[in-house]
Amino acid sequence: MNAENINLQNFVEKHWALRFGVSEVNWAQLPTTGSLEQALMILGYPYQDRLILCTAFANQTLRSPSNGWKLWPHELIDFRWKKWQTSFLKSTQNLGFYAVVPDANWVAKLVDLAVPTIQLRYKSKAGIVSEIRRAVSYCEGSQSKLFVNDYWRYAIEANAYGVHLGQEDILTADLEAIRRHGLRLGISTHTYDELRKAYFYQPSYIALGAIFPTTLKNMPTPPQGIAKLKNIVQLLHSHVPVVAIGGINAQNVQQVLSTGVKSIAVVRAITESLDLKHQVDFFKEQMAILQRYDECARVSKIEQ
């Protein structure tokens, strides 16, 4: 094994393989020359993501020849992603605890419990207009901000706070109309390639998932895991808010928050809860603890 392969093995095994849950690597499968792309393939990244990350690593190494290839790229300057000249409005408050629910009745329950961010994910086209209007009316004058999943035209008509779109939806939605009417925009992502596409539109937030396995719907990619989430939070934290979603519950929420993410979205942890108020209070307190910690860190940094 030549020096390049030894470096590659150390890079994958010592720095990243164990963090991503890759416990056994068949080094015999690697080409004799070795490559970063092969390492990323072992870590489970799809082809387009490998190209994006290889470019970022290369640019990072140009800036820091001595150790650029050893550090995971966390600077957008190395990714060189393009973006719209105009951005969507940012949220008027920290997204924080973000509940995704199936109908307006659920929205009403969560408004009463002062959940800061709510998404209406209504699956039926029947009655969708009235459902969105009801949900918006419940949030009026409250602390809760409502995002409507998919139905951007009706969200505009009802004057909702924001719209949440998937990757396929952003190809057909009139994003300029959404922005022009003052609605916030959230976009779902599952890969670096989808992050690149979402970042271009300068949305109000980017959702990354699924963090953990979920049976709620068929996911296009394996679970992200904590390490990947942390890398993406570090990449985007000063540019666009990241919302972690997928399989998050009371047992694993502290792992998620340890990545530095400032907002978590939950579905079944709320809709299947046996004690809704207790569950909501628990998640709100977790976010409050995080905010207090961040504030202490900010003050300490100022005093230094």
Image (cartoon, grey):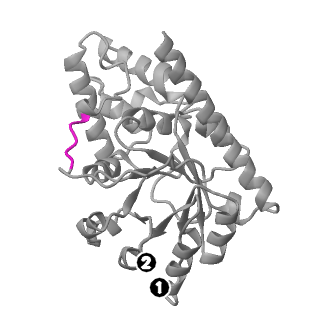
Percent position (x, y) of residue 168? 34, 67
* Residue farthest bottom in this picture: 126
Q: In which quarter of the image is residue 295?
A: top right
Q: Does the magenta stretch include residue 255?
A: no
Question: How many numbered discs?
Answer: 2
Residue appearing at x 22%, y 42% in the figure: 81
Residue 270, by quadrant, is bottom right
**Going 55% across and 41% down the picture, which residue do you hit?**
225
Check if residue 80 falls in the magenta segment.
Answer: yes
Provide the residue span drawn in magenta: 79-83
**How many neighbours does mark 1 have within 10 angstroms: few (below 14), some (14-19), or many (20 or more)?**
some
Q: Mark 2 points at which residue?
A: 158
Quadrant containing the N terminus is: top left
Residue 247 got which mark?
none
Query: For the view shown, which residue lies furthest in the right direction?
Result: 274
State the image coordinates of residue 285 (x, y, percent, origin top left).
Answer: 70, 43
Q: Write down the residue under mark 1.
A: 129
Identified by mark 2, the residue type is Ala
Q: Is mark 2 on a helix, strand or loop?
A: loop
Write the residue at 37% across / 74% down. Answer: 156
